[in-house]
Amino acid sequence: MESEAKLEALKARHAGAVALANLLAAYVQAGKDTVELEAAIAEALGGKQVQPAQQAQPNGQAQAAGDGTETGTFTVLEVRSGKSPGAVRAYCQAIDGTKHAVYAKNGAGQALAGAVDKTVEIKYRQGHKGLIALGVRLAG
């Protein structure tokens, strides 16, 4: 009887973990920032608390998040379709005037495509040919 109760508790915990993993995957696919969700998942699973990444400062300078990603403020100058379905290549200008190619897909790509001539905050990592957008949101 006791072992059956333990088994049911483990099944419920596993189902919860699978649901959280699916939610995280949906956030990533939609191009949303996952830092707070990751912290909540770690806490729910009994892991150590993960500190949210620092937000970009108002002057638009990139801020390192400690996980290989940075966040910066850019003006989207132009967006073109990428080589693979759902991917885009955007040309963006940072506050300091430097121009960057920014590659994105799924939700982040859609956000960039809808932000031509607008200012956005992009969470990104460095790629071989430009920046790889992990999350995009309108600034302001």
Image (cartoon, helix red, strand yellow):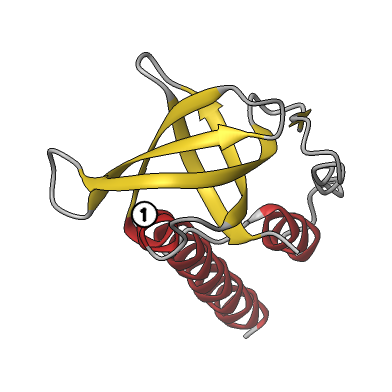
In the foreground, 1 or 125: 125
Name the image quarter holding the C terminus. Answer: bottom right
Quarter holding residue 118? bottom right
Residue 4 is left or right of residue 55, and the answer is left
Quarter holding residue 7? bottom right
Q: Residue at x 76, y 26 (%)?
A: 66
Q: Is residue 125 above or below residue 78?
A: above
Q: Residue at x 19, y 41 (%)?
A: 82
Q: Residue at x 61, y 53 (%)?
A: 120
In the foreground, 95 or 21: 95
Name the image quarter holding the N terminus. Answer: bottom right
Residue type at the position of mark 1: Gly
How many labels, in total? 1
Indicate the position of residue 71 as horizontal and vertical percent values. 69, 38
Which residue lies under the disc numbered 1? 109
Residue 28 is left or right of residue 33, and the answer is left
Q: Is residue 130 above or below residue 45?
A: above
10 Å crowding of disc 1: few (<14), some (14-19), many (20+): many
Is disc 1 placed on a helix, strand or loop?
helix
Indicate the position of residue 38 as horizontal and vertical percent values. 68, 55
Indicate the position of residue 103 as horizontal and vertical percent values. 36, 37
Q: Is residue 126 above or below residue 71?
A: above
Residue 98 is left or right of residue 86, and the answer is right
In the foreground, 22 or 52: 52
Quarter holding residue 59? top right
Q: Residue at x 35, y 17 (%)?
A: 129
**Residue lying furthest top in this view?**
128
